[in-house]
Every structure is written in structure tokens, then in C-alpha cells.
Image (tube, rainbow, N blue to C red):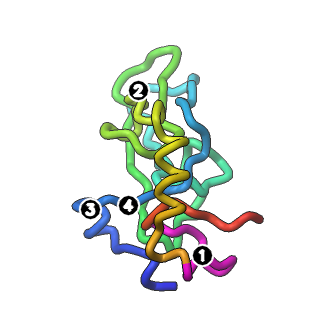
Amino acid sequence: MASCIRSVTRARHSLVYTERDIYGPYTVGGLTKGDKKLWCACGLSKKQPWCDGSHKGTGIQPTQWTVPHSQSLYQLCACKYTGSPPYCDAAHTYLPTAVKERQERCTRACAHTPEVKLCTGCGWVPDF
């Protein structure tokens, strides 16, 4: 199982694949300037787009975000592949095909078992 998890340090310098909650942005309102939030970076949280601690054991950490100013709506990333977290940058546009191909070629597929929360090598998660 450990071979399917990369450390947070390596995650910042190499490709780490996360679970995709949805292919598109979350439209979030009701935020106030200065609010501190933990944006889910792993895709496993049940309280998307916010962290609920489900990342434990994946090697992926949430992104701390301070709301920069009050505005009616924010477009936050839901696919977890943005280059500017937590904001959506439309990285989700070509993800469905890329994810399927990556999972089919995963060199860690032998470790895709229900005990593994998330394979950061391809983004595979068990069906619950």
C-alpha cells in the first residue's frame, strides 16, 4: 500500500493524481473577507470543496486559503487539477479521457485494493 502513496514533499515537485469530485468548478457564495478555509486537495472529502480530514493516509494535504475579499461568488476547483488552487482554471476540460487512460496504464494497479484510499499514481479510488 505504501508504494501507492507519495509524500507531501514529493507531491509538490512531481505529478500526484487525486480523486476527482466533479469535472467542473464549484460555485461558492456566502464567504467573507478574512474567512480561513481548508480547500480539499485530495478529492475525497464529503464536504466539498472544503476538507473533512479524508485525506489522512494519502500523502496529500489540504490547501489553507484566506478569502481575499468579499464578493458574491467564487469559482473553486472541483477536479483538483488546477494550477492555482483553490481557484478553477479549467484544467478539468480534458480530464475524463486523460484519467481513464492513466488508470489503464497505472504501474501500481496491483495495489488497487479496497484498503487503499487513493492511488496518487493514477487517481484510482475503490468503489464504496
Whether 16 is among the magenta residues is no
> Vertically, is 117 above or below 92?
below
State yes or no: discs 3 and 4 in contact (Cβ < 8 Å): yes
What residue would you read off at disc 1? 112
State yes or no: discs 2 and 1 in contact (Cβ < 8 Å): no
Cα–Cα gap, marks 1 and 3: 21 Å
Q: Which amino acid does label 2 sit on?
A: Lys
Cα–Cα gap, marks 2 and 3: 32 Å
- Numbered circle sitting on residue 33: 2
Residue 101 is situated, as x and y percent measured from the top left of the image, at: 50, 53
Nearest the eye: 106 or 60 = 106
Q: In which quarter of the image is residue 22?
A: top right
Residue 13 is situated, as x and y percent measured from the top left of the image, at: 22, 61
105 horizontally vs 19: left or right? left
Residue found at the far bottom of this picture: 2
What residue would you read off at disc 3? 14
Q: Which residue is drawn at 57% across and 23% down?
A: 29
